[in-house]
Amino acid sequence: KNQVEQSPQSLIILEGKNCTLQCNYTVSPFSNLRWYKQDTGRGPVSLTIMTFSENTKSNGRYTATLDADTKQSSLHITASQLSDSASYICVVHLKANNLFFGTGTRLTVIP
Amino acid sequence: SQTIHQWPATLVQPVGSPLSLECTVEGTSNPNLYWYRQAAGRGLQLLFYSVGIGQISSEVPQNLSASRPQDRQFILSSKKLLLSDSGFYLCAWSVRASGAHNEQFFGPGTRLTVL
């Protein structure tokens, strides 16, 4: 069964600290993997995209990694800010016109 | 630049009433268009997608329908709402192209509460 699982479901960290979010997937044939940030009550916004051949991609304080062999991806946030509080969604694209969304990790950054 | 609009932003409707949510895209032509629902604490669920005017694909059987009367307009409808239709509805667009799936750009969403 094609699935995308994210962990943890929720996370609370202090401002300035780092954190890592996990995404495990079983979907195939894999095309690319994206991480989206979704602020409360807003639409998701793409942070990073990685294809099969890429194993890391950075966007400012966000760094995504991909291990296509183990079908795992992570999103590392460095020096967190209050504005990082949001849900982070892992989305796997198949080579067909299919998308699989994870249920997201709810990150709360507290001062 | 491209922008995507959804309205209304929030909606409270009684069970059994009709529904019409609208999505429009500006600044691009021939986009792929998508409707998603996000229930509380759940992931995004693809409801419909469209690759052109009048072309609608449904991903899940349900109480809803979609239409694309114009190239950059996508409408989500229901004749009779159910309590289970409550949720956050997101419209998205992507560049129509062959090969690997493209990035989707999401609208601001509509919060629907069915009472």
Image (tube, coloured by chain):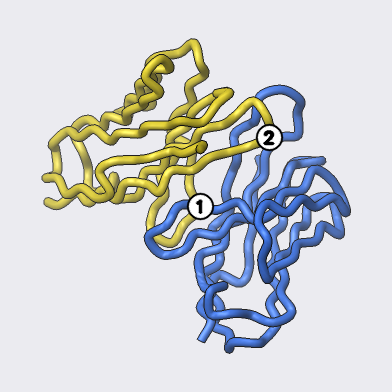
Residue B28 percent location from the top left of the image: 75, 41
A20, above or below B54, in the image: above
Residue at 88% over, 54% down: B54
Numbered marks: total: 2
Q: Quadrant of residue A81?
A: top left
- What is the three-letter code of the residue carrying label 1? Leu
Residue A96 percent location from the top left of the image: 68, 30
Residue B110 vs residue A67, the one in the foreground: A67
Local SS, label 1: strand
Residue A102 vs residue A64, the one in the foreground: A102
Local SS, label 2: loop
Q: Quadrant of residue A66?
A: top left
Which circle marks residue A97 in the picture? 2
Residue A74 percent location from the top left of the image: 32, 28
Which circle marks residue B44 in the picture? 1
Q: Which chain carries label 2?
A: A
Chain assigned blue: B
Q: Mark 1 lies on which chain?
A: B
Rendered hue of chain A is: yellow
Residue at 61% over, 72% down: B8
- What is the three-letter code of the residue carrying label 2? Asn
